[in-house]
Amino acid sequence: MPENHPTVSVIDLTASIGLHALAQLGAPAAPTQHHWPQILLGGNTAAPRIDWHRPRQPQDLGTVHPAPETVALLVGPGSLSMLRDVLTHRAIATTPAVWIFLLPSAVMENMAIQSAMQGAGLPALVLQLPDSAPQTLWFILMEQLGKLNLLAPTHPTPTETPHSMTSNLKEMMSTTMTIDGALAAALVDYRSGMCLAQAGGGMNLDLAAAGNSQVVQAKLKTIDSLGLRKGIEDILITLPDQYHLIRLIPNHPGLFLYLVLDKTRGNLALARYKLTDIERSLRV
């Protein structure tokens, strides 16, 4: 692996919700497998690599990178025994960014985490998930990763700059940001995971584009396998304080509009209506 591709280690201690997130990454899960190394996120070669672990016994932790840039620990009920071994692993103790995603029903595990944070000084941010939906876990994980500056440096040619936008795309992004409650917006090619245009802030939209591309690809495969002829209009993820809206653009196959909306200031129905109107003006 090139040195300019940082690694995010995901340690998955859930029964099944983590497998759904793993599927979003396009990694097939074998019954006896416990490690999926260096997964490319959304086809974006500049994005960090994901090392995904589902340890069943302490010796499985031997594959965990000793010093990744970030550790994301997914904790579900029934994982208390394995959790104790994970909390004492060297990667947890030495990595500056450790996130613990805690499912609502993991009560005993929460007590063990709180004890480790108080007694051993565990340097971690605990994120209590509002529900046990796989998509909620996925989007909160992508949102957290978007707050880190983990994208590999690129070297554009003099005629090629990152996120160079035509006047039409600039106008499109500006119009999208006038939607009440809009925090960030992007136009994404989900075939490559690349962000073609973006506006707003508060998160790493390149990383969000790559992660959301995985979601779209997985949903399209599901629709196809079910034999449903009508395509997807949009995908909505509801977080405690935000709406994440992914709207596919039928006139431009392979593209979608991504809108992050403040839940308290935005109107979801109106935002959907305005995105439909905005997509009609798209020229790429």
Image: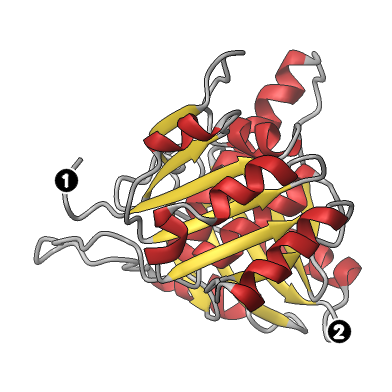
- Crowding around mark 1 (Cα neighbors within 10 Å: few <14, some 14 to 19, many 20+) is few
Where is residue 159? Give x, y as percent.
13, 63
Real-space CA distance between mark 1 and mark 2, rounded to the nearest whole angstrom: 43 Å
Q: Which mark is residue 174?
A: none
Q: Residue at x 40, y 42 (%)?
A: 64
Where is residue 227? Give x, y as percent.
80, 13
179 with respect to 282 (left or right): right
Callout 1 touching callout 2 (CB < 8 Å): no
| Above or below 110: residue 231 | above
118 with respect to 47 (left or right): right
> Callout 2: helix, strand or loop?
loop
Q: Residue at x 50, y 63 (%)?
A: 145
Q: Residue at x 53, y 35 (%)?
A: 58
Q: Which residue is mark 2?
A: 264
- Of 159 and 243, nearer the camera is 243
| Above or below 80: residue 154 | below
Where is residue 242? Give x, y as percent.
77, 72
Q: Which residue is mark 1?
A: 2
Q: Residue at x 73, y 24 (%)?
A: 222
- Of 11 and 256, nearer the camera is 11
Q: Quick check: can you spot residue 160?
A: yes
Q: Which circle's residue, 1 or 2, is located before the other in the chain?
A: 1
How many numbered marks have been drawn onto this rendered protein structure?
Answer: 2
87 with respect to 227 (left or right): left
